[in-house]
Image (cartoon, grey):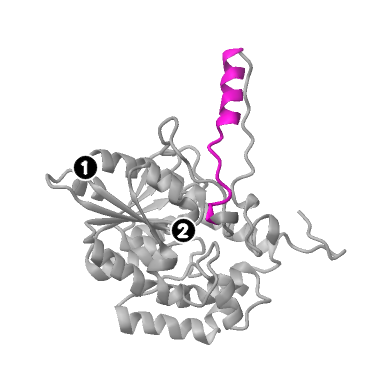
Amino acid sequence: MAFAAVAEQASPRVFAFVFPLASGHINPSLPVARALVRQGHAVHYLCREQMRGAIEDTGATFHSDVEVERELYEGREPDMIGAMESLKAEHGLEGENMMMAWGKLAPIQTELKLPGVIRWLTELGASAVMYCPMMNQEAAYAAEVLGVPSVALFTTAGPGSLERTSLEMCSLFGTTLDELAEAVRAYGPHAEAIRRLKKNFGVDFDSYLAKPFGRLGVLRHSRMTLVTTSEELQDPASDELLEAYRRDGVRFEVVGPLLDEAGATRAAGHREKLAEGGAASGHSDGAAVVSKVRAAKAAGRPVVLVSMGTVITGDNPSFGWEGRPMGAHGKPRG
């Protein structure tokens, strides 16, 4: 494993972790960071303030993406997906659904993120990078520009999961993947940003709407992709998708859920807004719930966990509870 090889070298190393404001994406990285810190290495996270507590609990150092990626965030409002809502307004895309806007603006946002991430990795003297390939592609590109090895942390149900998710989300927004891909290809600023990324950084941008659908092209830039589920629980993947990954030389390693130790602070929720006084909202140590579960187990009672995921409790206007589609009666449904 690329990370293990670097970590086992005699002198302490610097590891850079780049993750989004998404608890399900960052939580599996926390035990990895904790283990590296205990081995005497330095771990630095680039993330959002809401995740500071969970990050610092591992012994890692927190860095604000809003402060580091100033080309993107100066004059724009941070949200769950970078500064997507501000970029939508700048480009006259306020009426576009989340998938359409993300598809059109992804290379534009990546272009704005890259300079800050490259500066940050350079200042750290990073030995290796771990990142979320679904929401932080800029980390892989920056690492490649600098010649630093990267490892992707794939936190959904295996390579086939994005095929299924993309189809379900298109159905939700009343479109198809082919219609979405065609609209994105026809959007001039999208193509212009891709050309600038190649010219200015030598980066070949990987659209998530390239066929076969569901393929994360950015994975070809990393030494390895860790998948945080079991072999048995992975979603089925089409032969076409698996063959595309094989051609790209993508190496998947199924590592299980990467659970942290008992008592560890965990990230929670997708709350973009900070609570009054600047404290991060949407976080809970869950002590009261865990106490009740332990009491029930001690009494011999069965315990069933039912999770609706983490996105639904977020406050993004396009995604989650606040982003429910409007019904015919003019009120949110779902």
Q: Relative to 15, is 53 on the left or the right? A: right
Residue 156: give x, y in percent of width and height: 49, 49
Residue at screen point 21% across, 56% down: 127
The mark nearer the N terminus, 1 or 2, is 1
Mark 1, other Cα within 10 Å: few <14 / some 14–19 / many ≥20 = few
**Camera-nearest residue between 47 and 176:** 47
Q: Secondary structure at mark 1?
A: loop
Residue 55 visible? The answer is yes
Mark 1 vs mark 2, CA separation in Å: 25 Å
> What amino acid type is highlighted by mark number 1?
Gly
Residue 196: give x, y in percent of width and height: 38, 84
Residue 136: give x, y in percent of width and height: 42, 62
322 falls in the magenta region: no
Q: Relative to 275, is 196 on the left or the right? A: left
| Disc number placed over residue 107 in the picture, else none | none
Mark 2, other Cα within 10 Å: few <14 / some 14–19 / many ≥20 = many
Residue at screen point 62% across, 61% down: 316
Is 249 drawn above or below residue 177 in the view shown? Answer: above
Q: Relative to 89, is 223 on the left or the right? A: left
Residue at screen point 31% across, 59% down: 222
Examine the image and state in which quarter residue 33 appears. top left
Examine the image and state in which quarter residue 112 appears. bottom left
| Disc number placed over residue 40 in the picture, else none | 1
Residue 86: give x, y in percent of width and height: 57, 75
Q: Secondary structure at mark 2?
A: loop
Examine the image and state in which quarter residue 288 appears. top right
Q: Which residue is mark 2?
A: 48
**Camera-nearest residue between 142 and 267:** 267
Q: Are marks 1 and 2 in contact (CB under 8 Å)?
A: no
Magenta residues span: 278-299
**Camera-nearest residue between 15 and 263:** 263
> What amino acid type is highlighted by mark number 2?
Arg
